[in-house]
Amino acid sequence: MTINDIRIYISMITAACTLCACEKELDFRYHDIAPINVIESYVSDEGMQAIITETTPVDEPMNTTRMTDAKVVISDIDNGKSWQLQPDSRGIYTCNETGIENHNYLIEVERDGKYFSASAVMLPPTRISSLSFSWIKMPYDYVAALEVSFEENPSKDGECYWVRIYRNGEPYRWSATDDRFADGKGTLSLVFRTSRRDISEEDENEVLREGDIVSAGVTPISHSMYEYLEALTSGNSNGPHMFEGDLCLGYFIAGSTSKASVVYDPENIPYDN
C-alpha cells in the first residue's frame, strides 16, 4: 500500500461516514493497516544519527518505541566510504563520522525483509547573527517574542532552513522557513512567541522562567525537507515520500546546525513599541 493508497482509503472512510452517519454506526477496520516504518536520520558536522519507529493506529496511544533490529548504513557517494551505524542505549543509531560540505550521502536501511534508501547533499552552514527577546503586547498579556536572525545568500534563490528552539536543552519550538522572507541584504529572521509575562496564567509547556537557557539551532535543508516540515505543520499529510524502496515515512538530511543561546531574563527584556 502506497502513501496515496492510504490517503484514498482515509478519504473513502470519511465520505462513507458522512453519507451513513444518520443511519447506523459503522466499524471500519482502519486499525488493520500494518505499522509503517518511520526513519528520522541525518548527517552533520557532529556525526550521523538515525531513529527508527513505527506508526500507530489512530485509536491507540502513540508508540514511541525505537526499533533496534535494523541494519543502517550511511555512505559518502563522493569518496566511496561507508559506515554501519549501531544502536546505543537510547535506541538511537549513531556514528561519530562527520559529514563533508557539498558531499552526497546515501542512507540504506534494511528491516524485517524491507529496504529503504534516501540521499542528501551536505549543505554549507549558515551563521546566527542575533538571538534576542522583546515584549510584544497581546490582548491577554505581554508575550516574550524570541527573534532569531541568521545569514543567507542573497544571490541564491530557494534556500530553506529548519529553525529549532530549545528550553534548557529540551525541544520547545520549531519552524521551517525559506529565503522568500529574507531582507534582500543577506539576513533572514524568524520570530517565535514564547512565554507570557504573567507566568501564573501560563501553561507549563509554554512557560519560561528567569534563568532558563533558551537556545536556537538553524539547519540548512533541501526544498523537499522544507515541504515535509510544512506538511507536518498543516496536518494535511505526511509530506513528500523522501525514501525509495519499500514504503516508509520520515526524512534524511545532511547539514550543519548553527547554534546560539540566551538566558531568559524577563526584567531586562525591552518592550516593542
Image (cartoon, helix red, strand yellow):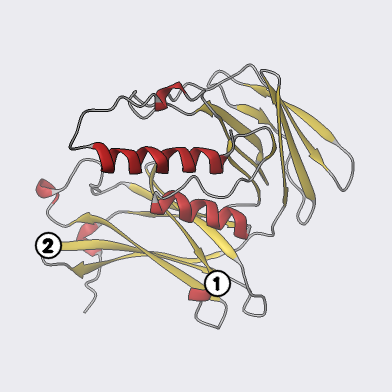
Give the residue displayed 77% in from the left and 45% down from the top: 105
Q: Where is residue 241 in the image (x, y as percent from the top left)?
A: 61, 45
**In the picture shown, does residue 122 fall above or below 43?**
below
The answer to whether 218 is drawn above or below residue 29 in the figure is: below
Answer whether residue 170 is visible to the viewer in this image: no
Closer to the camera in the image, 246 or 118? 246
Question: Which secondary structure lies at badge 2?
Answer: loop
Which label is found at residue 166?
none
Picture residue at 67% right of the left edge, 80% below the top: 155
The residue indicated by pointer 2 is 141
Task: Give the secondary structure at mark 1.
Answer: helix
Is 136 above or below relative to 211? below
All told, the count of numbered labels is: 2
Q: What residue type is labelled 2?
A: Asp
User: Which residue occupies the foreground of this view, 170 or 50?
Assistant: 50
Q: Label 1 is placed on what type of residue?
A: Asp
Does residue 151 show up? yes
The label nearer to you, 2 versus 1, is 1
**Residue 236, horizontal then vertical, whole percent:** 41, 50
Q: Mark 1 points at which residue?
A: 179
Residue most extreme to the front: 23
Q: Nearer the viewer, residue 133 or 109?
A: 109
